[in-house]
Amino acid sequence: MDALAQTALLVSLTSFSLGFATFARNVRNKLFLVFAVGCTVISTWALFYFISTVWPDGGWYGYHLSLNAWLAPAGLLFMQSMMRIDRWVTSRVLFYGSLGMCLVMTVMVLFG
């Protein structure tokens, strides 16, 4: 196990704990909820990288690659909520465009 895999495990654990603590603090606040979702996406992304380095023959790297694409909509959703621009047309077009591309990319990666 190399240093990058160990760092991915630390990122996964830290991101999950930050997201869970934020989610447990205030469920009604939309910004806290979106931050928790973003932390969960980062946590699963790093966890699948760690698993793919520990078991390289299991096909886990494909899941990690599909989660690379999901980092963009999670980040955009957090930025929209933080800056309160989620009602802007250009912001919604960018978010839904990236979400659609992520769905296409995930289907392509998972099903070959």
Image (cartoon, grey):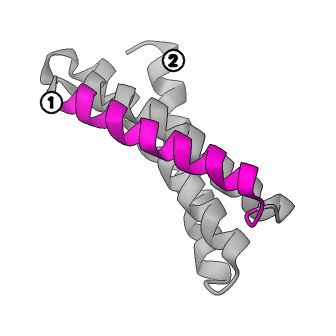
Q: Residue furthest top?
A: 2
Q: Nearer the viewer, residue 99 or 50?
A: 99
Q: Amino acid at mark 1?
A: Phe
Which quarter of the picture shows residue 37? bottom right
- How many marks overall? 2
Residue drawn at point x = 15 percent, y = 30 percent: 111
Judged left or right of residue 40, residue 57 is left
Helix, strand or loop for disc 2: helix
Q: Which residue is mark 1?
A: 111
* Range drawn in magenta: 86-110
Percent across and percent down for residue 21 are 62, 70
Question: Height in image: 52 above or below 11?
Answer: above
Q: Can you identify the residue that label 2 sits on?
A: 4
User: In this rendering, does residue 42 appear at all?
Assistant: no
Q: Give the main secondary structure, helix, strand or loop, of the magenta stretch.
A: helix
Circle 1 SS class: helix
Location of the N terminus by quadrant is: top left
Across and down, in percent, residue 78 comes to 69, 56
Q: Amino acid at mark 2?
A: Leu
Residue at 35%, 31% (x, y): give it. Answer: 105
In the image, 47 versus 6, the foreground residue is: 47
Q: Position of residue 42 (x, y in %)?
A: 53, 43
Within-10-Å neighbours for mark 1: few <14, some 14–19, many 20+ = few
Please determine whether, in this image, residue 94 is positioned above or below residue 29.
above
**Residue depicted at 74% across the width and 49% down the height:** 90
- Which label belongs to residue 15? none
Q: Is residue 52 left or right of residue 34?
A: left
Q: Residue at x 36, y 42 (%)?
A: 103
Q: Residue at the far front: name it.
A: 89
- Residue 13: x %, y % from top left: 51, 47
